[in-house]
Image (cartoon, grey):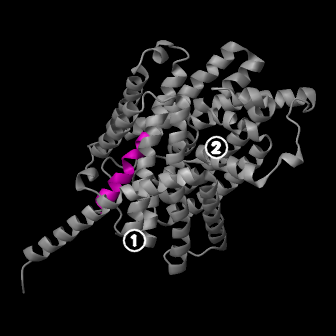
Amino acid sequence: MTEKRELVGGRTLGFWTCLALVIGNMIGSGIFLLPASLAPFGWNSIFGWTLTIAGSLCLAFVFARLARTFPKEGGPYAYSRLAFGDAAAFALAWSYWISIWVTNATLAIAAVSYLSIFVPDLASIPALPAFCSVGFLWLFTLVSATSIRAAGRFQLVTTLLKLAPLLVAILIAAFVVASDGGASVAPFQPQDISLSAITACASLTLWAMLGFESATVPAGRVKDPERTIPRATLYGTLIAGAFYLLASSSVSLLLPAAEAAQSNAPFADFVGRYLGHKAALLVALFAAISCIGALNGWILLQGEMPLAMARDGVFPRWFGKVSKAGSPVIAQIVSSGLATILVISNYSKSLGQLFTFMALLATVATLVMYVMCALAALRLMRRGAMQRAATVAAAAIAGALYGLWTFYGAGAEATSWGMALLASGIPVYFLMSRARSSRVVEADRAAPQE
């Protein structure tokens, strides 16, 4: 499909909003819990972060070039469809869409969990956290359905706020290291560094880097998408990666490993260690804001993928209906409805269990998309549909290899989830293919005979 569609409501997302969308969707709840997961790995986590950020930058560069050449709504779905056809594109979009609303369900629960520090009844009354989480889901669904511009502005504000605790952690670490000459830093032991540990760290840290493709998805709503999306994608990935590396490393190397590993709020404990209990509570508040901001950003995207699929005929047509404001309301309602079912059916699980489930599901589903888009860039360059460039080809190859390596690092359980995700979409694809064939036959019968 080569025509360029203009969505109802016009192009409302500029560079700063797209940059906030990338950074805000990347920095959610994971970074505030990761130091606990990485604590047993010591310095291996630094190497894991470095490889993850490098791999993500390679993939972000590929996405930036794809977006500049093909500024189409649906982003990754559109690229894979151009390169590999409907079936591959459907598989990518199906798994990615599921990963988005699963992420939204868990972000809503995480936000309520952080807020329970200030309102203890949220944690003590059965089922109340689930209903509050559902309330957050539908509040931001309403915001996104009513005004794309308002959702974008909210994203910009929350992105600025969520960077505050990360910056505080970095400044504390810089002050401590400058004061004692690095004596407080966990000692570097070369014999403790191993490829298996680095691989495990890379798999964990990739979860925090998911979302750098966010600006490519709502391309039909972006002003000057050929320039805006590539810049927002690259700058957003670089900024988020730098904050991640410095902030997470500060906590991992300065907070005792045993304490960090047992902590439910390692960033709050780290700040509280040096600035007191009130400062730790403030970090918890900013962590909740971070979850809420990421929830707003991902809800903004959860309707875009089914919208693009519906307009290409591989999803039911009613997913393609938009409101006067240009929002895919039906797709938003269905996505948030599925997220609501997930929240309610899992309300008895602990925060840690939910995060494990989310990380497995979202990471593997997104890895499928990352690898496929890297291969799509190589195929499109080979066919001449995209300008050939050695730097893009090298980044695509590196990104694909990095994705496959991380897929291996995620383990058999994550791979099983990924295969189940893809398989769940097979009946839908064949039903839609049959419906398209029926429409073509009916159209042929209705056409005047010569």
Which of pointers 2 and 1 indicates the residue nearer the eye? Answer: 1
Q: Which residue is mark 1?
A: 85
Is residue 308 within the magenta segment? yes
How dense is the environment of label 2, judged by Cα within 10 Å: few (below 14), some, or many (20 and up)?
many
How dense is the environment of label 1, judged by Cα within 10 Å: few (below 14), some, or many (20 and up)?
few
Q: CA distance from mark 2 to mark 1?
A: 33 Å
Up-down: is 312 above or below 338? below
Q: Residue at x 65, y 45 (%)?
A: 205
Image quadrant in which you'd find residue 270: top right
Q: Residue at x 48, y 51 (%)?
A: 417
* Residue type, mark 2 in image: Ala
* Residue type, mark 1 in image: Gly
Q: Is residue 202 visible?
A: yes
Q: Which residue is mark 2?
A: 240
Q: Secondary structure at mark 2?
A: helix
**Picture coordinates of residue 3 (x, y %)?**
34, 67
**Picture coordinates of residue 387 (x, y %)?**
55, 74
Q: Is residue 318 left or right of residue 349?
A: left
Residue toward you, 136 or 410: 410
Q: Which residues are magenta?
A: 298-312
Residue toward you, 443 or 6: 443
Q: Is residue 158 visible?
A: no
Q: Is residue 241 left or right of residue 362?
A: right
- The secondary structure that most of the magenta stretch takes on is helix
Of the numbered discs 2 and 1, the one sitting upstream in the chain is 1
